[in-house]
Amino acid sequence: MRNILQQKISQFRDADLIRAQNVYPYFRVIESGQETEVVLNGRRVLMFGSNSYLGLTNHPRIAAAASRAIEKYGSGCAGSRFLNGTLDLHVELERRLAAYTGKEDAVLFSTGFQANLGALSALAGRADALLLDEYDHASIIDGSRLSFSRVFKYGHNDMHDLEHRLRNLPADAFKLIVTDGVFSMEGDIANLPAIIELADRYNAAVMVDDAHGLGVIGVNGAGTASHFGLTKETDLIMGTFSKSLASLGGFIAGDSGVIDYLKHKARSLIFSASMTPASTASVIAALDIIQEEPHRIQKLWDNTHHMLLLLKEQGFHTGDTQSPIIPVRIGDNHKTFLFTKILQEKGVFVNPVVSPAVPSESSLIRLSLMATHSFAQIEEAVDKMKETALELDLSLELKKESA
């Protein structure tokens, strides 16, 4: 390695410090599918860290659809959508997504990250303004940087702060408010009615990142705008396929003119290879299942309510979550890593969230529910979480007398 590169990377010590404490929780190798139980280091553990909210990643209909797509189209498209990489399968999925989200049209991207990156960098320029919730996803942050526009962050779900930012911008400037629908760490939902009201008052457009809302909230899982009955008023809806829709990729849905613009201006679309045939067919099959089996969404919410009730009974702090994403506050980076490790040793997989993603005093365990979890699995996980918290002497208002 060249010396100058070695000097550069030698400044990065974060991972080594965690490894030295024997609590490194990243890049854990899973040896099975993303189900409610996975194989980790040769042993089965309960999975409470997956975004497969509806439990569809191993559904036989989806696997069959992916297999048929490979047989017909091959393993890839060997080019971008802009040139040689558009399949009739892509067009079909775009039509389905537009109908599902209640919009005129949609455009596919190879990942959800690319969808936000491409849309924001194409829509906003140097004279424009982007207004972002401070807890927005990293892909929104990076997209805003590539836009070269003026970027203003407002306090999380703080409508007074958002109005203050809007009030100080020129009335005739292009302004786009961008918010997560369901926030990926906190699990709460954007105050979309208030955002729409402010957008109308100050002549701004609204974009919702519904990565964690699709398949979870709204009519038949159609997302945050549907949840509030504000589909028409929401200008752009972004979604990913790697969660409820059991695949890989992303999309933007909106008015046909806006989508046509993005098809010709979004660099992450024009200069990236198309979604693979198997990934595309998988999403179409997932949409079919969601529409034919609405009980899956109800079971997801039954599981969510059951786990929240148990966690609160045991004194865990779960924040303001309104979704199957449940944050459990630990409040210390090292104890969060240690909690994750001990819990895995007890047979439960969870995800730690520590600084710089959140301040150390706000570090947490992020739990994700799936429709396919059983109540027995949820109860086992909560029991083991309680055991672990008591072992670490965490001040979580636990009922130690019942331990």
Image (spheres, rainbow, N blue to C red):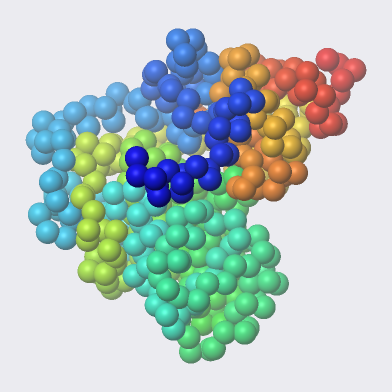
Image point (86%, 23%), residue name = 399
Q: Is residue 8 above or below residue 335?
A: below
Asked which quadrant contains residue 198, the reply is: bottom right
Camera-side residue: 130 or 206? 130
Q: Is residue 235 above or below residue 331?
A: below
Asked which quadrant contains residue 368, the reply is: top right
How many marks the image carries: the answer is 0
Left or right: 167, with 209 as reference point: right
Q: Position of residue 234 (x, y in %)?
A: 46, 66
Image point (37%, 72%), residue name = 123
Image point (49%, 60%), residue name = 141
| Quarter of the image where the C terminus is located | top right
Q: Position of residue 205 (x, y in %)?
A: 47, 74
Left or right: 206, with 83 as reference point: right
Left or right: 276, with 241 as reference point: left
Q: Position of residue 273 (x, y in %)?
A: 21, 50
Image point (51%, 53%), residue name = 137
| Quarter of the image where the N terminus is located | top left
Q: Position of residue 140 (x, y in %)?
A: 47, 59
Name, please, the residue furthest toward the top. Answer: 43
Name, please, the residue furthest toward the front. Answer: 3
Residue 314 visible, this orientation = yes
